Image (cartoon, helix red, strand yellow):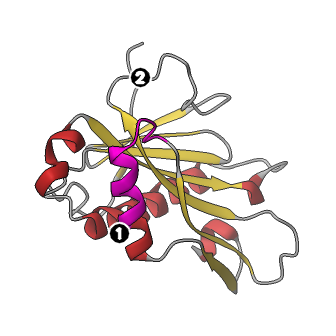
Amino acid sequence: MRDVLKADELKSTVFAETSDLVEGMRERLQEDKPTLPQATCSFAPRDTVSTKRLRIEFSWVPRTPDASGRNKLPGPLSHYDVNGAVGEANDISSHLRVECVLPGADKETSKQILLQGEASNTLLMGTEVQQKTINQQITFLYLMTRRATEALGCENDPLAKNPVVKPSPPPAE
């Protein structure tokens, strides 16, 4: 995290404890609009006084590409495969999508959609972003999404392996 934010000391803000994340994500699964994101936390260099920070959110997204483009990151994108999880990133944001099969009554619904982790690093705005920084951000997002899959109790344990970030071709339209 220190490398991603280029800071020795960090401050964090927690928007949702683990139990809040689980409750909120399960509620969203039952709603008509499960794609509303749930912010969990943000990180910034300790001496930052602006609103720039790295923010982590989670949501449920359709398995098929969203025709409206509402869930699409703007600008040129890099695409990734991280141990089977599908990732994409622009210069400040990244998405990671993974199948998360929930236990019990939510099992069938969870099989129809994907869990998406999103990292938005506004500290990078106005800077020339290096590929190494994007790879670090995708790796961090993988680790944070793994924590979410563990908290949610994903039966398929989709992110059990250590992250290996590999470039991949863009998905077929």
Q: Nearer the viewer, residue 128 or 157?
A: 157
* Residue 11 on image: x %, y %: 69, 83
Separation of residues labelled 1 and 2 (CA atoms): 25 Å
In the rendered image, the vertical position of residue 102 relative to residue 54, given as above or below? above
Could you tell me the amino acid type at mark 2?
A: Pro
Q: Nearer the viewer, residue 23 or 167?
A: 23
Which residue is found at the position 44% from the left and 71% from the top?
20
Q: Which residues are magenta?
A: 22-35
Examine the image and state in which quarter residue 34 appears.
top left
Left or right: 159, with 131 as reference point: left
**As drawn, which residue projects farthest toward the right?**
49
Which residue is found at the position 46% from the left and 23% from the top?
66
Magenta stretch holds residue 33: yes
* Residue 169 on image: x %, y %: 40, 26
- The N terminus appears in which quarter of the rendering? bottom right
Residue 167 appears in view: no
Residue located beneath label 1 in the image? 147
**As drawn, which residue projects farthest toward the bottom?**
9
Label drawn at residue 65: 2
Which residue is found at the position 40% from the left and 49% from the top?
28
Q: What main secondary structure does the magenta stretch of the protein show?
A: helix
Q: Secondary structure at mark 1?
A: helix
In the rendered image, the vertical position of residue 31 relative to residue 158, given as above or below? above
* Residue 63 on image: x %, y %: 32, 30
Q: Nearer the viewer, residue 121 or 155?
A: 155
Circle 2: is it few (<14), some (14-19), or many (20+) Cα within 10 Å?
some
Magenta stretch holds residue 54: no
Could you tell me the amino acid type at mark 1?
A: Arg
